[in-house]
Image (tube, rainbow, N blue to C red):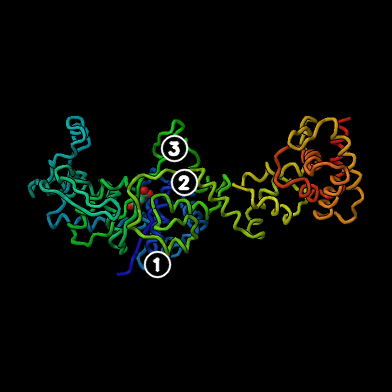
Amino acid sequence: MKVRTRYAPSPTGFMHVGNLRTALYEYLIAKSQDGSFVLRIEDTDRERLVEGAVDVIYNTLKTAGLCHDEGPDIGGEYGPYVQSERKDMYLPYAEQLIKEGKAYRCFCTKERLEKLSEENVGGGYDGHCRDLPKEEIERLLSEGVPYVIRQKMPKEGSTTFSDAVFGEITVENSELTDQILIKSDGYPTYNFANVIDDHTMGITHVVRGCEYLSSTPKYNLLYEAFGWEIPTYVHLPLIMGKNEDGSVSKLSKRHGATGFEDLVSEGYLPQAIINYIALLGWCPKSNQEIFTLAELCENFHVDEISKSPSVFDYDKLSWMNAEYLRAMDESEFTSFAKPYYEKAFAGKAYDSKKLFEILHERTVKLTDIPAMIDFFAELPEYDREMFVNKKSKTTLENVPEILKAVIEELSGIDSWNSDSIKECLLGLAVKMELKNGTVMWPARIAAAGKTVTPGGAVEILDILGKEESLRRLNLGLSKLA
Ligand code: GLU
């Protein structure tokens, strides 16, 4: 049988990393077995709908490279793929169950149900309408009394199901309330629509967060009532965040960004996010940690998903992001870094090849870039004390003489490039009988106005160009006068 998985988000306007992981695992399960990955939009909860939210879903899947084979935007044999467009499909299924004695109309008033839940907290529905006499039902129907359709849950015995991650799970049927399938407005409940959709769309693997584990017996009783084949369930472990006191709790905004778009705007690469998220709950057999999407498809196995909660570690994500940046060639790196260069240079010209050389080994997050290079566009205010460095053996006394010599030597360069600058500064150190660092430190401070820079004096002077370099070196010298 062809594997068919579905990603069934509710359009809430935000793609939590947990949802993205579900989408990724659905994609991997389908693609690793030559199956289809289906996108279904679950928009029946009209109160939760957010304008533009469906676009967030499309954009995220596209940016993350998780291309669906069927969905609202591209169609397919099993459409429609938006739940609200399927709304007429559900009632006939519920009526079929009524005919077979597996479901019933419940005419209980809101007041009665409220009173019941007050008296019987957590106990569920008491089955008042389960066995109403036929004549009574007909009378209520003819009077137009509103009703819901409930499923008849078995009162005895237990329901067992097997989950690919959590193993065998059993619940006592007496704990299951007669669930509502169709609401009084004729619309299906989420649980009912979900089962009908998964079955009619031929879904073979249902992947979702473990918060759905407790509803699964109810889904299965529906499959059984219809005599349908139960899909393979893959429930995923919780994603936790690290608290300041070292404890962990469910990942939320107080731990950091939790949405895909937010992580991207914090400077993480989509491919690094996907790679990192793949490892949240999946333990590959080898020690390999860096996987392309294609490699994930080859290596991913459902039986390697762990049921213990995984902790979202932002440091680890940063490490992975830096690995991805380091592996990029100049043109790829530049395509990602460009918006950040533009921000730092604010309209001024820059040389992206030279920036690549100083940044690509050192950048952890793209958002670090502007602060790393902003001194090129404008020399920051700095204090003369910065010239003093014990390790480089620079003091307020020896720096003026060194800077003067640096200016003199550099002024003589005709062809300004990193080789000629380096040769010139190293030659100067020899001539003055100084350590290389004693010449480089003051040159770098004067050129950058800060102590921590990507690249050393040579690279910085090269990027600044001769004129600007000499202007800054002279300015540095004048600070010491
Ligand atoms: N629409 C549900 C959600 O966004 C999906 C649940 C499921 O995958 O069955 O949480």
Which corner quadrant of the image does residue 429 belong to? Answer: top right
Residue 434, percent across and down? 83, 41
The residue tagged with tag 3: helix, strand or loop?
A: strand
Q: Nearer the viewer, mark 2 or mark 3?
A: 3
Three-letter amino acid code of the residue under disc 2: Phe
The residue tagged with tag 2: helix, strand or loop?
A: loop
Q: Nearer the viewer, residue 329 or 289?
A: 289
Three-letter amino acid code of the residue under disc 3: Lys
Q: Crowding near pointer 3: few (<14 within 10 Å), some, many (20+)?
A: some
Query: What residue is at 79 percent from the left and 44 percent from the top?
Result: 436
Q: Which residue is mark 2?
A: 14
CA separation in Å, label 1 and label 3: 42 Å
Q: Is residue 451 left or right of residue 405?
A: left
Instruction: Please tell me which of labels 1 and 3 falls first in the chain.
Output: 1
Kindly give the residue lying farthest to the front in the view shown: 433
Three-letter amino acid code of the residue under disc 1: Gly
Which corner quadrant of the image does residue 34 belong to? Answer: bottom left
Q: Crowding near pointer 2: few (<14 within 10 Å), some, many (20+)?
A: some
**Label drawn at residue 308:** none
The residue tagged with tag 1: helix, strand or loop?
A: loop
211 in relation to 34, above or below = above
Q: Which residue is mark 3?
A: 242
